[in-house]
Image: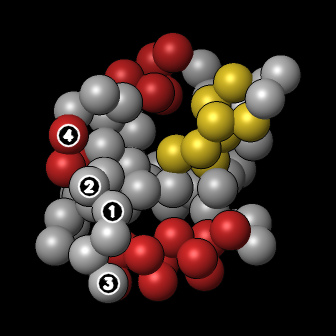
Amino acid sequence: MGLNEEQLKNICKLGKGEVTCSFLGMIPGSGFSCLKGTPVEAIIWERRDSGKMSAKGDNCSGPPNFMSQKSDPK
């Protein structure tokens, strides 16, 4: 699901280092999208848990509501 500039800044924390959302992905032709609830989500969790990601935020509930929640970087 495509994200607007406000969501990217305030919820996804784009460009904010470790607190940037782990589930933020770039879809060619669509821009930034949330990958929660997609087949890629399991891969992201594996990478987060193994320490292979620098973006460690889990900042919202995901689509469709994107309800803000406290990020929990490991």
The disc at residue 37 is none
The disc at residue 17 is 4
Residue 69 place in picture, x, y as percent: 32, 56
* Res. 20 image quadrant: top left
Badges 3 and 1: C-beta atoms under 8 Å apart? no
Q: Residue flagged by tag 3: what amino acid is it?
A: Ser
Q: How is the image coloured?
A: secondary structure
Badges 1 and 2: C-beta atoms under 8 Å apart? yes
Density class for disc 2 (Cα within 10 Å; few <14, some 14-19, many ≥20) is some
Residue occupying image coordinates x 83% and y 22%? 29
Q: Looking at the rendering, in which quadrant would you find the N terminus?
A: top right
Going from the N terminus, do you reach mark 1 or mark 4 first? 4
Label 1 element class: loop
**Residue ID for mark 2:** 54
Going from the N terminus, do you reach mark 3 or mark 4 first? 4
Furthest-right residue in view? Answer: 29
Badges 4 and 2: C-beta atoms under 8 Å apart? yes
Label 2 element class: loop
Density class for disc 1 (Cα within 10 Å; few <14, some 14-19, many ≥20) is some
Above or below: residue 16 compared with residue 25? above
The disc at residue 53 is 1
Residue occupying image coordinates x 46% and y 83%? 46
Residue 65 place in picture, x, y as percent: 62, 48
Q: Residue flagged by tag 4: what amino acid is it?
A: Gly
Between the C-alphas of marks 1 and 4, the distance is 11 Å
Above or below: residue 52 compared with residue 24? below
Between the C-alphas of marks 4 and 2, the distance is 7 Å
**Residue ID for mark 3:** 50
Residue occupying image coordinates x 16% and y 73%? 74
